Image (tube, rainbow, N blue to C red):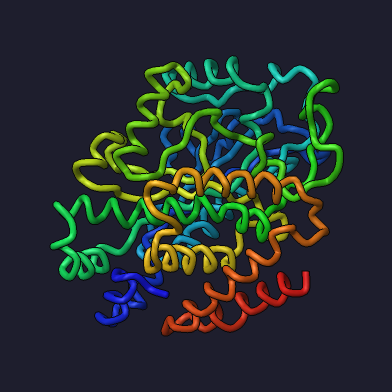
Amino acid sequence: MFDEIGQTIFNNEIVASASDFNMGIEVETIRVNSAGQLTKEPYPKLLGNQRKNHFIKTDVYQVQSEVITPTARKSFDAMHYLMALNDTLRNALEPNELLWPLSMPPVLPQDKSTIPIANVDPKQRAYYEKWIKTRSDTQGLPVGVHLNVSINDDVLKTVWQSQRDQYKSYAEFVNYIYIKLAQGFSYYRWLITYLFGNSPFAENNYFKPDEDQPSHEVRSIRSSHYGLTSDVSHNYRSVREYVDNIEQNIQAGKLFSEAEYHTSVRLKSMSGDLTKMVKDGTDYIELRMLDLDPTTALGVRTSAVRFFRILLSYFMMTPMITTPDKINLKLDQGRAMNEVVAMESPTQQTIYHHEARTFLISYNYLARRFNGDQNTKKSWIRCRIVWITRG
């Protein structure tokens, strides 16, 4: 089941370190009034200067609040940061304000131009204005959860010592592992949509009357082609080809910048310069496929973070899902599967039931071999497998 990297992790008894990751969590929400309408209140005064608060920001529109945790050495510490920041945001709201619990926005005004753009610096505001003019006037409104994840440095260095003869440099080795993660999450996004899709319908005025829209409740509008997507090519064969693809789309005028590459999985550099990833190595991966969970005030549950932790380990320690020359075709297949799953009725078993069950049984095998997180191994994963098995 495991490739050389996975076997090295087991042989060096670093499974515990390899089953947790440095993590930062971003949770986007929409501020509404007590009637469930978009708030007209400014950025909460108790949060200080809107342009200088690094932990509670606004997104494209002023009504969107984005909680951004510091990067934590352990994912559960990131959840603790999230709890504290969520409390801070809620306590700063005006008495008549609430946080909308769903990824899809509440009832919108017919004239979307009345929704104020975020009060950000002039350069960023100009970008938002340009972006809105070239997109649907509602496409920037759905919100969700992003996980920013990096692999423990000690794990990377330990594996590198036994694998260094197979790579030209440490950066090439690091990029190989991160592209494995990117490929795994890109392909299996359909499974994540099946397990965590939570945006079944759109409220009034999200779609225009004559606009194409779902005719029934679905599993996730946000995760479908109706959501925030980039109508550009995708390339995950290697980090170099990933970077080259984005730069080519920018040069062709299909993207304003790398920030507009709205895909579910993004490779990132701390410097913000994508080209440095090729030479210096990828710093972290951004996973952007989670809808808000309306059953928790945080927007995401610890059980979901546990699931992603084990997925990260699984993709890191097992072989790539196909050969490099076929990977983009495989990922195209995964994107097509995700569209099907997102548009399925949320109360029905997916047509990919067999594929989901087969994968999760393999996933559960890996989780059982981890030493530590008994809740992940026994409780939540088994519950999910039973749920999928019974449909």
Judge by depth and name the residue closer to the eye, 346 or 360: 360
Q: Kindly tell me whether residue 27 is visible in this rendering.
A: no
* In the rendered image, the vertical position of residue 51 relative to residue 158, given as above or below: above
Q: Kindly tell me whether residue 317 is visible in this rendering.
A: yes
For the point 42% across and 75% down, the residue is 1
Number of marks in picture: 0
> Left or right: 15 with respect to 330?
left
For the point 48% across and 37% down, the residue is 48
* Figure quadrant of residue 229: top right
Q: Position of residue 343 (x, y in %)?
A: 75, 45
* In the rendered image, the vertical position of residue 22 relative to residue 14, given as above or below: above
* In the rendered image, the vertical position of residue 113 relative to residue 224, given as above or below: above
> Left or right: 14 with respect to 389?
left
* Figure quadrant of residue 279: top left
* Figure quadrant of residue 143: top right
Q: Quadrant of the C terminus?
A: bottom right
For the point 73% across and 72% down, the residue is 387
For the point 86% across and 37% down, the residue is 215
Q: Position of residue 8 (x, y in %)?
A: 27, 75
> Left or right: 181 with respect to 132?
left
Q: Position of residue 111 (x, y in %)?
A: 76, 17
* In the rendered image, the vertical position of residue 382 relative to residue 142, given as above or below: below
Q: Position of residue 153 (x, y in %)?
A: 25, 62
Judge by depth and name the residue closer to the eye, 372 or 126: 372
> Left or right: 320 with respect to 291?
left
Judge by depth and name the residue closer to the eye, 272 or 264: 264
